[in-house]
Amino acid sequence: MADRLTQLQDTVNQQAEYFCNSIGILQQHSTPSKFAGFDRSGSQTPQQQDDYAQLFAALITRCAKDIDALIESLPSDESSNDLQHQCLRKLEQENQEAAERLEEVVRKGEILWEQVQASLADIAQSQLEMQHITASSSNARGSS
């Protein structure tokens, strides 16, 4: 759905179109003025003119009400600045909290990494000792 400013712009454009069309209808269906020496009779009935007048009056009025409603729904300058500052403060606070959580997770990760490294070193040392013991027992059996 379009934002309010776009809706307002579309509604104002629609209103302009109604005005333009109503003027075109007036020009098309108006009775000609009488000029001396020039006689031309209009063939349009007053009933049709009234229908167009009522139609465009209703359209223009409804569109004007829509424009008023859209303008009223727009936020004021002061409230939007205040809201933006409040949102920014909230986002900064959330960002700070997220940074603190991230630092804690990184610290715990580093501790775990050190524990894994120490465990791997112990495993490697144990394997070397086992290989040394295996080699020593093989040599001892081979010399007997």
Image (cartoon, rainbow, N blue to C red):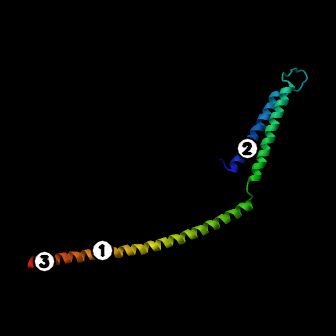
Q: Disc 1, disc 2: CB below 8 Å? A: no
- Which residue is tagged 3? 139
Where residue 139 appears, as percent x and y from the top left, is 13, 77
Which one is earlier in the sequence, the residue at label 3 or at label 2?
Answer: 2
Q: Which residue is at 66% across, 47% downward?
A: 2
Residue 26 seen anywhere in this rendered image of the structure: no
User: In the image, is 144 to the left or to the right of 39?
Assistant: left
How many C-alpha atoms fall within 10 Å of the one at disc 3: few (<14), some, or many (≥20)? few
- Which residue is tagged 1? 123
- Quadrant including the C terminus: bottom left
Where residue 35 appears, as percent x and y from the top left, is 89, 24
Q: Disc 3, disc 2: CB below 8 Å? A: no
Q: Secondary structure at mark 1?
A: helix
User: In the image, is 129 to the left or to the right of 93?
Assistant: left
- Name the amino acid, label 3: Asn
Image vertical order of residue 81 relative to residue 44, above or below: below
The span from disc 3 to disc 2 (Cα, nearest Å) is 98 Å
Q: Quadrant of residue 93?
A: bottom right
Q: Secondary structure at mark 2?
A: helix
How many C-alpha atoms fall within 10 Å of the one at disc 1: few (<14), some, or many (≥20)? few
- Name the amino acid, label 1: Ile
Q: Disc 1, disc 3: CB below 8 Å? A: no
Q: From the image, state whether disc 3 or disc 2 is nearer to you.
A: 3
Task: Name the disc covering residue 11, or none.
Answer: 2
Q: From the image, state whether disc 1 or disc 2 is nearer to you.
A: 1
Which one is earlier in the sequence, the residue at label 1 or at label 3?
Answer: 1
